[in-house]
Image (cartoon, rainbow, N blue to C red):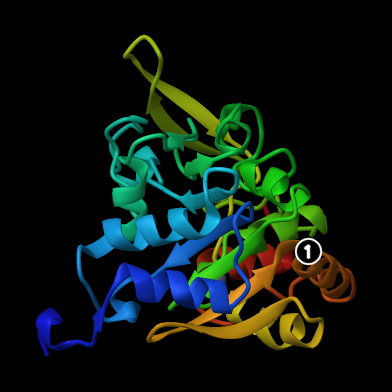
Amino acid sequence: MTDENLPRVTREQIVDSLKKIGIHRGDILALHSSLKSLGYVEGGAETVIHAFQEALGFAGALLMPTHTYSFPIWSKPPYDKNESPSLVGNITEVFRRMPNVLRSDHPTHSVAAWGRFAADLTRDALQYPPTGIGSPWHRFHEAGGTILMLGTNQNACTMLHYCEAAADVPYLDVTFTPGVDYEVAHRINERGEVEEYILKQVPGCSRGFHKSEPCLRENGALEDVKIVNSQSQLLDSRKMVKAMKEKLKSDPFFLLCDFPDCGICVRRRNCAV
Ligand SMILES: [Zn+2]
């Protein structure tokens, strides 16, 4: 089936759906998204973003990950805030290039934001772990943000990495590279030079994150919603962090995946740097 044969979706339908699930002007919303889950959107990603901007207004805020994973060992080029494409979906890549959208300096886990809190959510990214305490996700949580997983599930939810840090799970220092507690990323600095950036508390594997869904539903943190044709999840970040901190206190390895060949999760379970 080509895109043109999918159900047609308009900006108005998306705005209506957002109102129906309780998104209001002034809200702070983080969006993880699958564009194709909506059907065929006239105008593509830009239409979707305009719908969210209309629903939230500039008094609200829209936050998206624009990760580039600029690790030299993964053969990724140095992160250039203005040029490096987002690797986490078409909507995020279009969003970061739109007017009045700011992007953070982080070479692996950058975010882009629009609206009232855009400057606050994107500032000082190099001073903090990418998704931990002090990160944009921490600030988003403190501001009482709502998360929408548009056609995706918790495996794509960056806030669960923040939950790992907030719960101080014992494996935060275990990275992809055995034997060290850091990774090396690289970026183009303000003078146009390539520089290395040392990364601590590297966000690891998220293939087990979907296991959080029943717990989040039980705690009233996750609601299953529909945005036009897209089966989606709506989350209250404060309830989510509270529920996950509790869960991770009794079962610190709960969010790790169960794939026996997953290098990092196996080592994280043993907490072997
Ligand atoms: Zn894993």
**Residue bearing the label numbered 1:** 241
- Dividing the picture into quarters, in which one does residue 119 lie? top right
- Dividing the picture into quarters, in which one does residue 10 lie? bottom left
Pick whichever, 262 or 44, lies toward us.
44
Compared with 49, 247 (above or below) is: below
User: Can I make out residue 8 in this image?
Assistant: yes
Pick whichever, 226 or 192, lies toward us.
226
Compared with 115, 216 (above or below) is: below
Q: Amino acid at mark 1?
A: Val
Pick whichever, 133 or 16, lies toward us.
16
58 displayed left or right of 247: left
Pick whichever, 191 or 208, lies toward us.
191
Q: Position of residue 197 (x, y in %)?
A: 50, 28
Q: Position of residue 170 (x, y in %)?
A: 79, 58
Compared with 13, 136 (above or below) is: above
- Within the displayed image, which quadrant is ligand 1 positioned in? bottom right
Q: Position of residue 73 (x, y in %)?
A: 37, 43
Q: Secondary structure at mark 1?
A: helix
User: Can I make out residue 271 in this image?
Assistant: no
220 displayed left or right of 92: right
